[in-house]
Image (cartoon, rainbow, N blue to C red):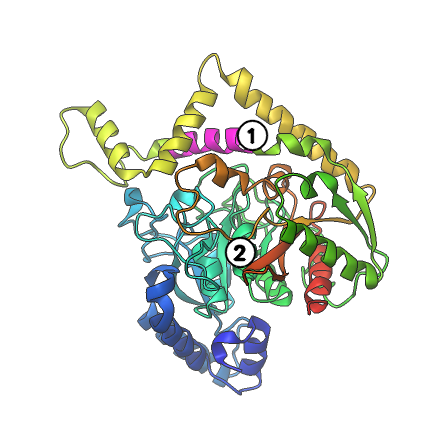
Amino acid sequence: MSITTMSLTALSAALQAGKISSREIVQACISRIQAVEGSIGAYITTCEEAALQTADRSDARRAAGECAGPLDGIPVAVKNNICIRDVRTTCASRMLADFVPPYSATAWERLEQAGCILLGKTNMDEFAMGSATEHSVFHPTRNPHDLTCVPGGSSGGSAAAVAAGEAPCALGSDTGGSVRQPAAFCGVVGMRPTYGTVSRHGLVAFASSLDTIGPLTRTVADNALLLDAITGHDLKDGTSIRRPGGSAQRALGMGVSGLRIGLPKEMLAQGVADDVRIAVLQSAQRLEAQGARITEVSLPSLRHALPAYYIISSAEASSNLARYDGVRYGHRAAEYADLEELYLKSRSEGFGPEVKRRILLGTYALSAGYYDAYYQKALQVRTLIKRDFEGIFNQVDALLSPAAPTAAWRLGEKRTDPMEAYLSDMHSVPASLAGIPALSVPCGRNEAGLPLGVQLMGPHFSEATLYRIGAAIEGGEG
């Protein structure tokens, strides 16, 4: 087996057994990046020389008996909206094209303390606004399984890097599905953890009440290992919470016998491709064959989730992105007559079309005379969705649904119709609005050979249970 196709846990075991060195792993990833990056475009910035130097330090620690843990010496790719000190962090936008943070995000600091090595910063939709990784000022990213297709978004670069063997694991961010949908499109595992369990400190804000950092990996076990490393309370993040219950890895291998798993009928209705629906039902059958109890459930408020999400997220984006004014940091127009023209030109030149669209939508929803009709109503819908989930989790332990309504689409196919692209988030935004954990797990391929993914959702802090079910789906593949 090639180093670049090995799982994170297999690489960790090989390192601990002395069968391989960290330098060999990093060099294999660098060679793979050099071989395929020209056709995939998963990265914006690579850190090859620094990665090799860090790998040498890891190997020296291990030789001296001072290994930092199971992740020591493991290379990681990181999404371009997660700050890393002295490494360019652009959010795939002209607005931050040359921004070099003076500090690191807490999630990366925790991986660094665990001995992880930065391979580079991955491509994304600008400011995490998009579902295809086509809305990047640098270049689009292509799906490693079919270069004519999108990898999903906005964490498409991270998902593609893992799927293509350019990194064994990656960090992404998930606002309305930006880890789970690209995971499904690229055939990898992606977790959106319970809101507040992973610090947002150092994550460039899109929609603060929805943004979450999450891991993308090749296997469920890898994902649990990486999530455990970045989880924990952080005083630098006012929304950070103390997570009860210990390790996300603790339930792996326990099986699903006796677990109650619901199939929300609203998530298998109109708009879902036949191959996706069949894949979800087959996954349910596999779980049932392993002892789980499958039942159909209803979440009637979900039909309102998508419009509520786009109102809330756009309103928060309008507020968060107001700071990019050409004065303090970010892109600044070269010529302007007065302060108003400075604002106008800097923001017009710095933001791309999709970001402008959402800022305008959010500003409108927050404006006098429309706040109550749109933003306030969306918040009320969010409360209804939370209550629906709370009620259903009194009946079942987890929910099984599509991660996305279709497989990956062709590059450019939905660029002229943003509403079509927004509809691709219909299965992922409900969990985001409720703040609950959700896991995307590969579940086969369609007739065109493109990966399909199922989504598992559970109550707050149920990541271990979701990994338990995900491992059963993963083990039942084939």
Percent x, y for residue 425?
55, 42
| Depth order, front residue of 333/470 | 470
* Residue at image point 57% right, 85% down: 17
Percent x, y for residue 294?
82, 51
* Residue at image point 27% right, 39% down: 350
What label sits on residue 217 in the rendered view? none
Tell whether 47 sits left or right of 304.
left
| Depth order, front residue of 254/161 | 161
What label sits on residue 185 in the rendered view? 2
**Magenta highlight: main SS:** helix
Q: Does the magenta stretch include residue 327?
A: no
Percent x, y for residue 140?
36, 53
Q: In which quarter of the image is the C terminus?
A: bottom right
Q: What stretch is highlighted in magenta?
A: 309-321
Placement of 293 over or under 251, stated as above or below: above
Query: Which type of secondary structure does the marked residue at label 1 adopt?
Result: helix
Percent x, y for residue 168?
50, 69
Query: Circle 2: is it few (<14), some (14-19), or many (20+) Cα within 10 Å?
Result: many
Q: In which quarter of the view is residue 416 placed?
A: top left
What label sits on residue 307 in the rendered view? 1
Placement of 275 over or under 13, stated as above or below: above
In this rendering, does residue 253 appear at all? yes
Q: What residue type is labelled 2?
A: Phe
Query: Circle 1: is it few (<14), some (14-19), or many (20+) Cα within 10 Å?
Result: some
In this rendering, does residue 109 appear at all? no
* Residue at image point 51% right, 48% down: 178
Residue furthest to the front: 447
Query: Which type of secondary structure does the marked residue at label 2 adopt?
Result: helix
